[in-house]
Image: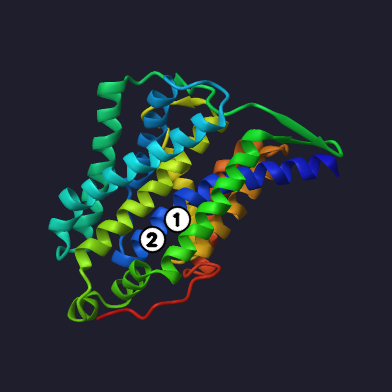
Amino acid sequence: MEQILQQLLNGISLGAIYALIALGYTMVYGVLRFINFAHADVFMVGAFLAFFLGQNLPANSIASTILVLLAAMTGCALLGTLIERLAYRPLRSAPTLNVLITAIGVSLLLEYSGQLFLGANPRTFPPVYPSAQLTLGGVILSGNQLLVIGVTAALVLLLQLVIYQTKIGAAMRAVSLNPDAARLVGINVNAVIAFTFALGSALAGAGGVLYAINYPSIDPLMGLMPGLKAFVCAILGGIGNIPGAALGGLILGLVETFVGGSEASTWKDAVAFGLLILILLFRPAGLLGKPLPEKV
């Protein structure tokens, strides 16, 4: 029983990181109806921004943790806005395939620029967060896991408030439903889309910091596998659905953890992508998503 509870806690912690990345995918898709495959590399940039700042801050400090989180989120928000302005906005009326290829190109640009300027060797993330453990009934609660779960829950709730309780959130929902009608009623569609990219990228930056704190080895290609799995989470929960992205992250995190702790541990990545195939076959809209009519 204790082992099951421990795996459950580990799965929730891992799933929370996946959920933060998946939220960026699902937000952009919800507004623009395309997948930003460069999003996983924004996650990597967030980890490196925190790495360079964390080297110059006191170790094992909550204040240092807050600073690196805010810095990474701010830097990634600016990067996301820049990517949208330079790479995606000129292709707003282009075929979807053109935008998809551009997204892959931006992803490769970030990855290989990282290798060129930062080097390909892994780097050890500085210990900015206090390492502490609490044992309850034989279950070990690490401070890192509590940080991940707490920050993710707070950011998801904040995101829900922004989308459903603010004017910019109402504008995002309007642009998602019909950008032309939104433009006719005075909504600045370009500003809304830029804000969506900034918000999604900030969440990816937070995910990069939390991932680096829990798995303190970072490199320019670190976003590849977490990004792909977060994409699976977004599809699993229902692409374009924010609670669905969070649910998908938790499900995949739990599945991976329980499979990784069994005799089939070498199959955990296969199981993740097997879930993607199954959900596409039997429920293409995802667990919480709703089928959308095709425009012809």
Q: Are marks 2 and 1 in contact (CB under 8 Å)?
A: yes
Amino acid under disc 2: Met
**Residue 195, quarter of the rendered image:** bottom left
Amino acid under disc 1: Leu
Q: Which residue is mark 1?
A: 23
Q: Position of residue 194 (x, y in %)?
A: 25, 57
The residue shown at (44%, 77%) is 291
Q: CA distance from mark 2 to mark 1?
A: 6 Å
Nearer to us in this view, 12 or 72:
72
The residue shown at (54%, 61%) is 278
Nearer to us in this view, 267 or 135:
135
Q: Is residue 218 above or below residue 171?
A: above
Residue farthest along the left direction in this orientation:
90
**Residue 123, quarter of the rendered image:** top left
Task: Give the colour scheme shown.
Answer: rainbow
Check residue 27 in the rendering and tell me which mark sits there, or answer none: 2
The residue shown at (27%, 43%) is 79
